[in-house]
Structure formats: C-alpha cells, structure tokens
Amino acid sequence: MGLFSFLGRKSKAPPSADDGLSPDYAFAHYALRMFALAQPLEFLAIVMSPDSKLFFEDVLDNVAENCGRKTSFDADAIRVQPVRIGDYSCAVVELPDPHEIAHAHMVALVALIDTPDIREGEPVDARYFTLEKGFQLDNTPRTVLCEWDTSSHSNYGDGPRPNVEEFVQAIGQLLKI
C-alpha cells in the first residue's frame, strides 16, 4: 500500500534512492510533509487516531520502497502529541533521536483554522515545521527550527531543546500567538 493509497490519493513523485536522501530525512521532510500540507485536517485526524500506527507503517513502507532502504526506526518509535497553539489544532510528531545533521527530532503541522470554523470541503491553510539536529564545531548539542511549504524551506536559526513544549512555544512565537 503506497503513502497516498491509505486515503485514496495519488502522490507526486516522492524522493528516490537516486536523490541521495536518507530514508529518515525523506520521511520527515518529504513524505509526511506532502500528505500534511495536501490534506491538513485528514493528516491531523489520522495521526491523532488509534490508526496512526497503521498510517505511519504505510508511510515508512512507501519511503523504503522509494529510497531503496528502510528508515532507522519503525512506527512503534513514533509518538504524536496533539496540542493547541492559540486557537489552532496542531500535531507534533516525535521521532527517535536523529543520528545525522538536518534530520528531524520532531515535526509539527498547524492547521490555521479554529476548530468551530471548519466547513466540510473548504480548503484549510496549514504550516509545517521541523526541529532538526544542527551542527556545532565544538560538538555541543544544537537544533535548528525550520518551516517547509510545498516547495521551499525556511531556516529560522537556532531552535529550542528537542522537547515538545519548547518546540510548540517556538512555533507559537513564529505565528505570533
């Protein structure tokens, strides 16, 4: 079952082994992002549901197929924290500690709509953030706070320590909430 076959959607061409991307990077920066930004409410619903493990297994299988190898973790290692940032619903997806620079500690999708305002079929704006392992010459821990849209990446510089509360607070500051 492919990434978008889980909910009956076709995907754009995902990264492949020829792109030189590691599966861990592709999972957080491409596969989850593609689905999350294409269908934000569906993404929030599935990752916060009892079926989230099946969804993550499907995404991980799709990444392995396209990258030619598996991620360094499985679906059991992924944790989801549903939170609110101001009036907005958000899911923080916690990943195992990254081993490589630019790999994600966690990602977050923020749906920019207050829950009571949701109308079926209406498009929903959303923002996708990553908290990535950074680099320091002296090898001290560093994170980098980033945001991705469907085609580009913004780097906001030093991020918070890799915990959900500080990540959510940093996102709230970016959203001016």
Image (cartoon, rainbow, N blue to C red):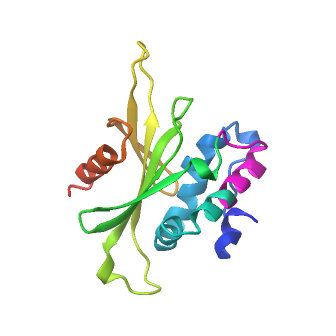
Quarter of the figure that contains the C terminus = bottom left
Closest to the observer: 58 or 150?
58
Q: Is residue 16 left or right of residue 175?
A: right
Which quarter shows the N terminus?
bottom right
Q: Is residue 92 found left or right of 23 in the rendered image? A: left
Pick the residue in front: 21 or 168: 168
Residue 28 placed where, x, y %?
Answer: 55, 48
Tell me what residue is drawn at x 26 percent, y 53 percent: 172
The part of the chain drawn in magenta is 58-72
Name the residue: 36% across, 47% down. Answer: 164
What secondary structure is the magenta-colored segment mainly?
A: helix
Q: Is residue 64 magenta?
A: yes
How far across and down, in percent of the image, does residue 84 sit? 30, 63
* Residue farthest top in this picture: 138
| Residue sticking out furthest to the left | 177
Say which quarter of the image contains residue 145. Answer: top left
Magenta residue check for 45: no
Q: From this view, report whether residue 99 is shown above or below residue 60.
A: above
Residue at image point 39% right, 38% down: 162
Which residue of the protein is positioned furthest toward the bottom in this rendering?
120
State whether residue 142 is above or below residue 86: above
Residue 86's quadrant in the figure? bottom left
Q: Is residue 94 above or below residue 2?
A: above
- Residue depicted at x 62% and y 41%: 24
User: Could you say which is closer to the camera, residue 141 or residue 121?
Assistant: 141
Please state the horizontal and vertical placement of residue 87, each as a whole percent of the image. Answer: 25, 69
Name above or below for residue 155 compared with residue 9: above
Across and down, in percent, residue 124 comes to 41, 74
